[in-house]
């Protein structure tokens, strides 16, 4: 039922009455589904002003710097919940009570190991393969282990896929790291919490005992929470579009991994640290800010700007606090943090960045924290993918649970040739 209507008129003639629907928060939406019949498409490359779906999972207000998961503010979740609680909230819509949390944690623990045959997929990669390439390939390969008896229209089977993916992503991610450094894979330990287990699989070796630092585990868990979901971003939209055809969920998540890898999206944290390293010292900050402002120079400040946040990214604020906490607790003086702070200060006072509303985003500080806790740069986006995995699967589940779910099939503005006569090669 429409809340109001928009009349679209062209040259004074009303060609369509378009219903306007209100959500529970955010912009109202103009329902343009009948526009095709009137002979028009909307045109919105990059989907700057297009609502692709109806969702109750995450709300963002880019002007006010608001991010809420199922109505819970991100800074509350980051400081008062752990990542598994956030996974439960994203999947089920409510915060779990103690019994529900313990049951959920137990289920995830029962799925942390991977099939021994999955190990062989790694041995096809070159030693210097990027961990994101391995993650994309091996997560996609999971679809060969869970396909024939998977009914994606059965809610309980969708939830089991969610449990498997949440549980196995850290195991596969750590395996990608171990493969890249030539160390043996480490099995998960179910007596450790989610972040501790990941760090154990990443850094322990058979030759000696590895003790997880509580500070590092807490920082890791907070980074997981801060990257868990973010409305209809590029990788989540990729998973939704892939899943809309009824494709295997593990293959859809692999598509999300591929999309996230791009430097304009999840690859920005790795690119940001590479940029900070390239800048190297405080006296070169102004030179790089000038490059970022130079239209003839393709260089952009990685970790700055956002399609939605035209004010501060609330995750960056929490990440900044965490960055200082972790470096202080670990007693680390990182000159790159000094460069980052100087870059942030210069950029936020520069008219170019102010006019274009370019603020530090979630990726700006995460790279410095990850470096401080010993995560190698080429694993940064893998960490992002591990975290966003729950957001992808929550949106996939929500989409398939919605009545009347259709395959996504956008149209286009055609600018090519039309009605040409084909001359056979023999006559050309
Ligand atoms: C993530 O969508 C999500 O929610 C993503 C994410 C999530 O959680 O899923 O939040 C995670 O991807 C964060 C963004 C990480 N990417 C980066 O940090 C890469 C650097 N940032 C940009 O490439 C850019 O800001 C985007 C891609 C993030 C947003 O690009 P838009 O919205 O398409 O905006 P745009 O590219 O059209 O830029 C608008 C203007 C342009 O100048 P004009 O053409 O108007 O003259 O701002 C300029 C751009 O040149 N600009 C920058 C800049 N980002 C934009 N100039 C210098 N440095 C930058 N970083």
Image (cartoon, helix red, strand yellow):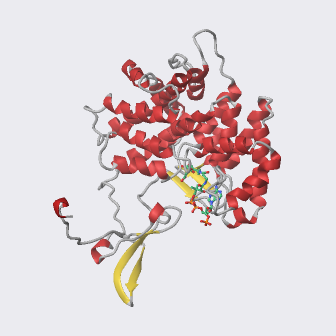
Ligand 1 quadrant assignment: bottom right
Quarter of the rendering containing residue 336: top right
Please give left or right for residue 103 compared with residue 181 in the image.
left
Does 25 appear above or below 68?
below
Q: Position of residue 107 (x, y in %)?
A: 44, 27
Q: Pick whichever, 419 or 247, lies toward us.
A: 419
Q: Pick whichever, 346 or 286, lies toward us.
A: 286
The N terminus is located in which quarter? Answer: bottom left
Q: Residue at x 27, y 38 (%)?
A: 151
The furthest residue to the right:
283
Does 398 appear above or below 112?
below
Q: Residue at x 64, y 63 (%)?
A: 295
Quarter of the rendering containing residue 123: top left
Q: Residue at x 17, y 62 (%)?
A: 424
Q: Position of residue 226 (x, y in %)?
A: 60, 43
Q: Pick whichever, 30 or 235, lies toward us.
A: 235
Q: Position of residue 229 (x, y in %)?
A: 52, 46
Q: Position of residue 174 (x, y in %)?
A: 53, 26
């Amino acid at each position: 039922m429409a809340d109001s209507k928009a009349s679209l008129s062209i040259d004074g003639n009303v060609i369509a009455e378009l219903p306007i629907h209100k959500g529970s928060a955010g912009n109202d939406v103009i329902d343009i589904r009948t526009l095709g019949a009137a002979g028009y498409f909307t045109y919105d490359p990059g989907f700057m002003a297009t609502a692709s779906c109806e969702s109750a999972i995450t709300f963002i207000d880019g002007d006010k710097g608001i991010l809420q998961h199922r109505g819970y503010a991100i800074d509350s979740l980051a400081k008062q919940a752990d990542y598994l609680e956030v996974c439960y909230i994203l999947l089920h819509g409510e915060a779990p009570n103690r019994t529900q949390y313990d049951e959920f944690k137990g289920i995830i623990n029962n799925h942390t190991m991977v099939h021994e045959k999955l190990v062989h997929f790694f041995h096809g990669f070159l030693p210097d393969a990027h961990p994101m390439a391995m993650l994309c390939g091996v997560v996609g390969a999971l679809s060969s282990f869970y396909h024939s008896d998977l009914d994606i229209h059965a809610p309980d089977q969708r939830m089991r896929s969610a449990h498997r993916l949440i549980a196995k992503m850290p195991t596969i991610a750590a395996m990608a790291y171990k493969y890249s450094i030539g160390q043996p894979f480490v099995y998960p330990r179910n007596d450790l919490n989610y972040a501790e287990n990941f760090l154990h699989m990443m850094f322990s070796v058979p030759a000696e005992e590895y003790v997880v630092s509580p500070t590092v585990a807490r920082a890791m868990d907070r980074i997981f929470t801060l990257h868990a979901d973010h409305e209809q971003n590029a990788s989540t939209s990729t998973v939704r579009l892939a899943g809309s055809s009824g494709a295997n969920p593990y293959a859809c998540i692999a598509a999300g991994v591929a999309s996230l890898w791009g430097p304009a999206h999840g690859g920005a944290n790795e690119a940001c640290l590479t940029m900070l390293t390239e800048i190297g010292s405080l006296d070169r900050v102004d030179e790089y800010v000038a490059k970022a402002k130079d239209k003839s120079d393709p260089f952009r400040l990685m970790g700055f700007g956002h399609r939605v946040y035209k004010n501060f990214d609330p995750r960056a604020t929490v990440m900044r606090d965490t960055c200082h906490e972790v470096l202080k607790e670990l007693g680390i003086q990182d000159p790159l943090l000094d460069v980052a702070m100087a870059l942030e200060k210069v950029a936020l006072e520069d008219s170019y960045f102010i006019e274009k509303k370019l603020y530090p985003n979630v990726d700006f500080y995460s790279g410095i924290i990850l470096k401080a806790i010993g995560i190698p740069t080429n694993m940064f986006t893998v960490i992002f993918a591990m975290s966003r995995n729950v957001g992808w699967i929550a949106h996939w589940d929500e989409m398939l649970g919605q009545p009347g779910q259709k395959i996504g099939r956008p149209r286009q503005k055609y600018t090519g040739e039309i009605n040409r006569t084909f001359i056979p090669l023999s006559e050309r």
